[in-house]
Image (spheres, grey):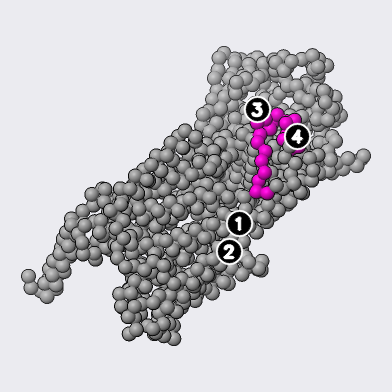
Amino acid sequence: MELFKYKKPIPLMAKAKIFFAISVIAVLASWALIAFKGFNYGIDFAGGTLVQVKYEGKAPLDKVREAIKRSKVFEGASVNYFGSQDEIIIKVRTSSKKLGTDIGDEARKLLADTGKFEVRRVDMVGPKVGSELREKGLMALVLAIAGILLYVSFRFEWRFAVASVLALVHDISIAMGAIVLFNVEVNLDILAALLTILGYSLNDTIIVFDRIREGLTTVKSAKLADVIDESVTRTLSRTTLTSLTTFFVVLTLFLMGGEIIHGFSFTLLVGIIVGTYSSIFIASPLLMFMGFDVEKYRHKLAEKKRREQEKEKLRAMYEQGTV
Amino acid sequence: MKLNYRVLIFIAAAVFGLALSVPSIFNTKGPKITLGLDLQGGLHMLLGVDTDEAIKSKIKSLASAIKYAADDQDLIIDDFKIHDGKISFELLDKDDMPKMDAILKKMAGIAVQKEGLKYTVSLTPKEIASVKKYAITQAVDTIRNRLDQFGLAEPTVAKQGKDKILVEVPGIKTPQQEQRIRELIAKAAHLQLMAVDEERASRVNQMTPAEAAKYGDVILEDAQVPGRKYLVKEVPILDGSMLTDARVAFDRNNQPVINFSLNSQGAQIFGDFTGKNVGKRLAVVLDNKVYSAPVIRERIGGGSGQISGGFSVKEAHDVAIALRSGALLAPVFMEEKRSVGPSLGADSIKASMIALITGFLAVVLFMVLYYGIAGAIADVALVVNLFLILAIMALFGATLTLPGMAGIVLTVGMAVDANVIINERIRELLYEGKSVAKAIEQGYANAFSAILDANITTLIAAVVLYAYGTGPIKGFAITMSIGILASMLTAILGTHGIWQMVEHKIDKRNLNRWFGIKVAGGNA
């Protein structure tokens, strides 16, 4: 089967400014969402307690709400279905430090006559731990980006590094925007998803960049736009196919992985789409906007090659014993 | 068909992967993957330690040591008090000062202030720091001991960070069991034998704690009879640190009691005290509650005693465990707790297995449809990759968590990426009219740097994730890192070897079957 047969370069760079404008708007909108609406921090980061209860048959939501009203511990608690109508989740922003009897035990007592049920999960995160996790999470993001910046600068050129990191910021921003927009609860697994997006989208970008690096020496035109067009077009099939296979897999995770992994897979889905888009339409044009000069680069390469050849020549002369 | 080193390595990897995955999949003997608490169910707790309490009790035991030494040498001291973390007392006789100084000199980590005959003893800052540190390590040991004696499957107790303790107990079946474990951990198990202040005991019900403190006394409640109070000397005669053993026994009425024995120093102190105080009451205090206060009839030698008072057998058993494994110098409190019931864990495994299998099948099918035999070869690499991940995880005893499962599912999606890149390169070269052998060789060569760079950057992200993540995220980072490394081996080396084995069989007219393409004019 052939879906993307390479015929001639698609003139993507001619329209770069349009895509760019779209992305800038999307990123700004995401930032605005994050700033004004803010993340819906789950208990991992905000602290609090979560009790997951599975009933035999449909969960009596009203009865549960009524029952937990009797306790002060559950003041301001929210009760919702979780995944199916049999299962509910009770969430409250408070946490208890007591080891002896905890909120889970309390919940079991309060719910005693609401029906037959099983407490399947009790998560409690104290406020201190929550803020520590938040700091650590942010630290992880920053460090990962710094590491990538270093590696790409070393393997490519600084403009490539900056472009790939900007593309990353773009992807992560939009993914975060989507998280805020769809009110996905931000827990540790969402952080894991964001970091995966980071790896994935970078993966995509690097593969395109690798082709551009190759194109710089093989494509005849000295215009960067031409080099990029050809390189992007040649990697288009790979980019789309890989994204497609990964997308399949994550989609099955989203559809069949159960409620508990919903936020995680949702974030990944958004990330895959945005990451694929950005590696094609955003990362490469950034190289252009940063004034990457093909002529200069080729000159530098030629210069390097010349020096190496000279060294070779000198060495050969020494080895023959004549100077 | 000729074997080459690439295929041999690939076969070795496949055999290794299959052999080491078997124990995990079929539950046979051998190294197995440990399931995370989120998958098998269990209790995960992050505990904080209230180290200030450890300082307080350190000062208390320091006070009883001073008092004992002073009594031993017949020094008469007055106004003995603990206030604001400091011990203060006054000597009555000036001639006793050298003796007192000698006693204090022998004690480490204290600072002494003198004002006439008035002494103030406090802990040095260095001592405070080391007591706090010790309180945490001691708490880790104590909790571990208690859980070990409780007889549960492989609990983990470890210090985390500077001042936290991570406790993980897998295999908990019921909430009641979980609660019992939490209570066992939380039990301070602080045993004290204290003298009842017989002079003032009759007024205990009218006394305020402040008034009691003035006499160097404290008011403690009875463990069983609510409202019954005792007035006891604040400085204990001895505490649980001199305990060597504690066992459940039964008294004449077949009620469970706890027999304890003391070490030689404790036995001596106990003997001396009981000898001097016949006719007075001795309060057996556990965690600041009085369990019994028998009247001393005679000197008790041999250094053993009994705690009685309305325990259930289970309770007595837990108290004995707690006493045996030592008191918690500092109380612990909950910073984070996650408990997952076994049924939820099983559901999570089921759901992610379904996702893994369907996702896997979709990718396998797609590759064959799109690339023909080349796709099938990539699929073989993918299968081996999957087993390799399991095998390596089993070998290192890594923990598989729910996000870890997601990591494997994701690896399936990303592992074919290397082969997609390679196959695309090969197709390109074939379109250009290169021979099959050349297209394969150059395809691999051209794709290599892209795959390497892409994987290393992803690996960087995974390593950072591992370093900064906790629990489930660490699990995710582990599976992803192993997946990336395994895919380098299977997708680059393995498939290359297979091609080298079969490439001379490829007919250029059959490119559609092998690579899923029709090359115009490719009828060479």
Vertical arrangement, residue B194 with respect to residue A39, above or below: above
Query: How far is mark 2 from mark 4, CA to CA?
Result: 41 Å
Element on which disc 2 rests: helix
Residue marked by disc 1: A256
Looking at the image, do the residues carrying marks 2 and 1 touch, with CB atoms under 8 Å apart? yes
Residue marked by disc 3: B60
State which quadrant residue B439 falls in.
bottom left
Q: B409 left or right of A219?
A: right
Dot 2: chain letter: B
Q: B416 left or right of B166?
A: left
Question: How many residues crowd mark 3 within 10 Å: few (<14), some (14–19), many (20+)?
Answer: many
Dot 1: chain letter: A
In the image, what residue occupies the spot 53% across and 33% down?
B129
In the image, what residue occupies the spot 77% across and 49% down?
A56
Query: How far is mark 1 from mark 3, CA to CA?
Result: 59 Å
Q: Three-letter amino acid code at disc 4?
A: Ala
Q: Are marks 2 and 3 on the same chain?
A: yes
Element on which disc 4 rests: helix
Residue marked by disc 4: A67
Residue marked by disc 2: B358
Vertical arrangement, residue B59 with respect to residue B97, above or below: below
